Image (spheres, grey):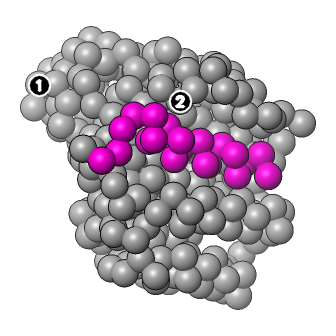
Amino acid sequence: MAIPVYFSPDYVLARHEFDTTRKAQWMYESLVAAPIAGIEVRAPEPATAAELGEVHDREYVEAVRTGEPRELAESQGFAWDPALWTMVRASNGGAVAAAREALAVGTAGSLSSGLHHARRRHGAGSCTFNGLALAARAGLRAGAQAVLVLDLDAHCGGGTHSLLAEDPRVWHVDVSVDDYDAYEASERWTLDLVRRAEDYLPTVRERLAGLERAAPQFELCIYNAGMDLHERSGDGALIGITTEVLAARERLVFEWCRRRGTAVAFVLAGGYISATLDRAELVELHRLTLAAACG
């Protein structure tokens, strides 16, 4: 069975030029030029204002739609233009669609990024709306009794924590290498800051093993698959985190979900061009996630 991966040209409509607002198109073009067997690209339904309002303050949602007040509409760090609203509705709709479809077929994804720093009342860190929180809530509404958010971006997912930490049905494993957006950890919301590359994969393995001992059986994992910890990424890089390390991480995550019988919905998360990492190489890093999803 094909793995649905959601994308629409609307994902990249905003005028703001940044990896987060352009990467989905690069990934789609890569899949057209060099398809990955088992991946089926689909267009999602965009998130509605009402759906966004289930996670975010309605005043903030309206600010992103209209551009006023401008400071609030640009709180994620992007210059506002009317296409921003269309873009973030599409990309967050893709994350939600991936969650719902994963519950039906086992694995699904979206070429979305720029999600986990957004708060209820404002954006942050290039994230306008929090598609991880939206996807988790969608999974719960679709019948999941317990949802895991697995955040392996280089940076901490403080926005997701602020939105979901009070929900006892949601667990969160966050293994980061940069303390941006850190938060106070708890039993259900673990946060590891890894400072040495040799500790990274063992930490991910230990956290996943710990869930097998202490956590419920998750029907759904929302996986934020960051590549920004790669040693040559433009932001979040940790020396010693190579392409091979990240490929091993992706295999580890998807194999763990398959072994546990946990559906997994993935999004792309961070990864940035630098003087030593070009666009083609960045695309290849994110293709690691798609390849591992196909097994």
Please say if 141 is above or below 59: below
Q: Is residue 222 above or below residue 239?
A: above
User: As rendered, which of 153 and 242 lies closer to the eye?
Assistant: 242
Left or right: residue 240 compared with residue 123: right
The residue nearer to you, when weighing 68 against 175, is 175
User: Which amino acid type is shown beneath numbered disc 1?
Assistant: Arg
- The image position of residue 107, as x and y in percent, is 75, 46
Name the residue that disc number 1 marks. 70
Residue drawn at x 25%, y 24% as measured from the top left:
17
Q: In this rendered view, identify the residue nearer to me: 243 or 166.
A: 243
Indicate whether residue 80 is drawn in magenta: no
For the N terminus, the image quarter is top right
Please, what is the three-letter code of the amino acid marked with disc 2? Met
Q: Quadrant of residue 146?
A: bottom right
Q: Mostly what secondary structure, the magenta segment?
A: helix
Instruction: Report which residue position mark 2 lands on.
Output: 27
Q: Of tags 2 and 1, which is closer to the observer?
A: 2
Please provide the residue range marked out in magenta. 276-295
